[in-house]
Each structure stands twice: as structure tokens, then as C-alpha cells.
Amino acid sequence: MSLPAVVTSQRLRLVLITADEAADMMAGRHRANWHPEYPREDDRDAVSMGPVEGSGDNSWGPRHVVRAFDGLVVGSIGTTMPGSSTTSLRKRTGRRLVVIEAPQED
């Protein structure tokens, strides 16, 4: 079973992480549409496990968690197959999100 490059809901988009984005994440570089605290160390760990977009069958690879209303990347999510079996229906899912505090009212 494959997933599309972008999985969309009303509030979020889950976008496959590209090889260029993964390289930026691993090198500690930041992009304008990423939350200031993203990527965190656990996000870098996720992309190091790949596969990322452009590297064969990657539909279950790591993805950015993107807020739909403003396009801000606020975390990552990824799945891995257990063991070496690629036919197993059981998958492990991990997610990592930055903490965004609500604005304080005066």
C-alpha cells in the first residue's frame, strides 16, 4: 500500500521530506517556513532513517507536519516496518512536534 506525497486533513498536511530538506535538517540549516525550534534532534534522527522523497519506495518515509492555515512546519512524523519484512501490516509510528504556546491576553 502506498501513500500520496502529501496527506491532507482539514488542519494539517503531512508532506514527504525531500532529500534536500533532509540534508538541511542534518546540517542544522533552517528554512523560512519551518518553526524556529524545528528541526529538533529527534526530527534529525527520523530523517536519518529515511527513505526520503526521491529515493525509491518512500511513501511511508518521514514527513513534515505542516499547519494547513499558514504552511508552518511544526514537526515530523514517520513510520517504519518492523524487522526486515516489507509485507507486514504492523507499522511503528513516531511523531515529534514543537510546543507552541497560545498568545497571552492582556
Image (cartoon, helix red, strand yellow):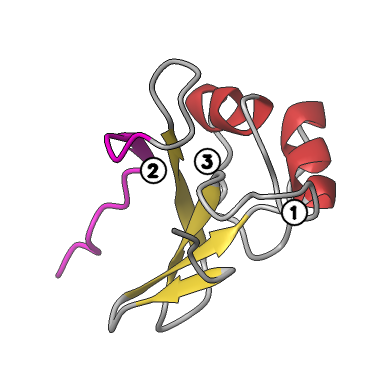
Q: Which residue is mark 3?
A: 37
Quadrant the C terminus occupies: bottom left
Alpha carbon separation for disc pair 1 and 3? 19 Å
* Mark 3 surroundings: few (<14), some (14-19) or many (≥20) residues within 10 A: some
Which disc, if any, is residue 18? 1
Region of the chain picked out in magenta, as a range: 88-106
Q: Residue at x 75, y 29 (%)?
A: 26
- In this rendering, the label closer to the viewer, 1 or 2: 1
Amino acid at circle 3 = Glu
Image location (x, y in percent) of residue 88: 35, 34
* Nearest to N terminus: mark 3 or mark 2: 3
Residue 35: mark: none
Q: Is residue 49 above or below residue 31?
A: above
Q: Is residue 3 above or below residue 37?
A: below
CB within 8 Å, label 3 to label 2: yes
* Label 2 crowd (10 A; few <14 / some 14-19 / many >=20): some
Q: x, y percentage for residue 51?
A: 67, 39
Task: Find residue 98 and name its label.
Answer: 2
> Residue 1 appears at what percent x and percent y?
44, 58
Q: In the rendered structure, which disc, 1 or 2, sits on the residue that comes first in sequence?
A: 1
> In the rendered image, which quarter is residue 92 located in?
top left
Would residue 101 be counted in the magenta stretch? Answer: yes
| Percent x, y of residue 84 | 50, 18
Kindly state the secondary structure of the residue where label 1 is placed.
loop
